[in-house]
Image (cartoon, helix red, strand yellow):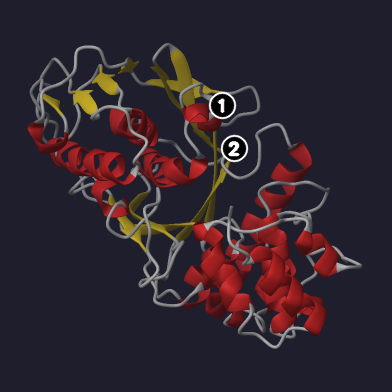
């Protein structure tokens, strides 16, 4: 386990602009909440970011918090000033990851830069890497497909409260944690790891869309869990052949790893979302627990009104399986509900185009073709 000397960097080793924002990160502290959850936290530019767990001791490593906020720094062109020594192998990966994110995010006004620790720590005794494999699990299509068909064979399932469901949405939090426990028990006896974080409420995280942050955020949680697992698996977003710049990507996710301590894996697939869903239509566990919603416009596990809910429901309707999934509400007029969404941008057009390849009822087919896939003006 090595540490790094003070360095400054940017893509292609470009000189650091002294006028960049500087976000001081650290030092890391351990915490115990009133409800018994224990965790770690560190100030990021004066505002703390916390990661807590229900039944496991988290590792107070600076890489955990730094990884979680590094995507925002890269996209916004800010300097991270790390107050504690970090692993040199992790640092080399973060260099590459930040450069990749800055290149992808064409709105970046300046090159990203990071300031490494000012001190060198003594070399600690190397410990054995835990054999556990943790899979990030939200209860969505990608999560269930990875668990059932991704070839991962996880020993742990990880759900992070505060990423998809707000920390104060107590009813949905309870539902998600109950789902995590039920799926872990039924799918093969995996250990459920319930984690929560206030990362999304941090002022700098609010300046960047979650699509750019979520891969690094999940990887940061993985570093905090490195005393329990040696591998963290992130389910796929877009399939091979349709990859686009995104905060979780097969070329990006592994760069957040800490060599010899934690490997971050992206579960790549050639299957588009509709084919991953097709693989689940006869799965009783997915039928009972599928959660895809993140907008939560209505009560319940899936609101049935947002784009992601309606897209998944349209796919299930085309697969002849919507009535098998009890987590979706009844929608009297799905074509009318879909029409309110309007034309889709590139991120979703391919998935909605896949819906048209299914044997949809005529009214549903027409609204997808004429409304959602109309040119974006």
Q: Of helix, strand and loop, which one carries label 1? A: helix
The residues tagged by marks 1 and 2 sit, at their Cα atoms, a distance apart of 9 Å
- Residue 300 percent coordinates (x, y): 81, 52
Q: Residue at x 17, y 23 (%)?
A: 116
Q: Which mark is residue 147?
A: none
Q: Residue at x 52, y 75 (%)?
A: 148
Judged left or right of residue 231, residue 96 is: left
- Label 2, residues with CA under 10 Å away: few <14, some 14-19, many ≥20: some
Q: Is residue 344 visible?
A: yes
Q: Which mark is residue 162?
A: 2
Residue tagged by mark 1? 201
The one of 223 and 320 positioned closer to us in this rendering: 320
Q: Residue at x 50, y 59 (%)?
A: 346
Are dots 1 and 2 in contact, CB under 8 Å? yes
Mark before the other along the chain sequence, 1 or 2: 2
Judged left or right of residue 185, residue 234 is: left
Q: Is residue 62 above or below residue 175?
A: above
Give the label, 1 or 2, closer to the camera. Answer: 1
Dividing the image into 4 quarters, which one contains the N terminus? Answer: top left
The residue lying furthest to the front in this view is 377
Q: Residue at x 36, y 28 (%)?
A: 76
Res. 168 image quadrant: top right
């Amino acid at each position: 386990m090595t540490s790094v000397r003070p360095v400054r960097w940017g893509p292609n080793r470009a000189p650091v602009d002294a006028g960049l924002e500087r976000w001081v990160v650290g030092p890391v502290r351990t915490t115990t909440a009133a409800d018994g959850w224990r965790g770690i936290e560190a100030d990021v530019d004066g505002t703390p970011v916390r990661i807590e767990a229900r039944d496991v001791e988290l590792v107070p490593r600076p890489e955990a918090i730094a990884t979680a906020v590094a995507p925002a720094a890269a996209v916004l062109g800010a300097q991270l000033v790390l107050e504690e020594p970090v692993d040199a192998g992790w640092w080399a990966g973060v260099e590459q990851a930040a450069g990749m994110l800055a290149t992808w995010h064409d709105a970046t006004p300046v090159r990203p830069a990071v300031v490494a620790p000012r001190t060198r720590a003594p070399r600690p005794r190397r410990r054995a890497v835990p054999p556990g494999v943790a899979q990030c699990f939200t209860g969505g299509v990608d999560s269930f497909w990875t668990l059932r068909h991704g070839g991962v064979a996880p020993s742990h399932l990880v759900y992070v409260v505060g990423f998809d469901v707000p920390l104060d949405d107590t009813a949905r939090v309870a539902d998600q944690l109950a789902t995590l426990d039920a799926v872990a028990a039924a799918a093969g006896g995996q250990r459920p790891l319930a984690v929560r974080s206030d990362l999304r409420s941090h002022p700098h995280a609010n300046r960047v869309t979650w699509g750019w942050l979520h891969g690094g955020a999940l990887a940061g949680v993985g570093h905090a869990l490195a005393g329990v697992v040696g591998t963290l698996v992130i389910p796929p977003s877009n399939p091979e052949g349709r990859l686009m710049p995104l905060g979780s990507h097969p070329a990006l996710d592994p760069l957040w790893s800490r060599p010899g301590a934690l490997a971050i894996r992206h579960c790549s697939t050639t299957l588009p979302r509709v084919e991953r869903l097709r693989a689940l239509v006869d799965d009783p566990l997915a039928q009972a627990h599928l959660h895809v919603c993140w907008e939560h416009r209505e009560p319940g596990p899936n609101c049935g009104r947002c784009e992601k809910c309606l897209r998944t429901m349209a796919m299930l309707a085309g697969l002849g399986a919507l009535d098998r999934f009890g987590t979706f509400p009844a929608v009297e007029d799905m074509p009318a509900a879909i029409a309110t969404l309007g034309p889709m941008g590139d991120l979703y057009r391919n998935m909605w185009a896949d819906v048209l390849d299914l044997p949809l009822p005529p009214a549903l087919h027409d609204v997808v073709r004429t409304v959602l896939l109309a040119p974006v003006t």
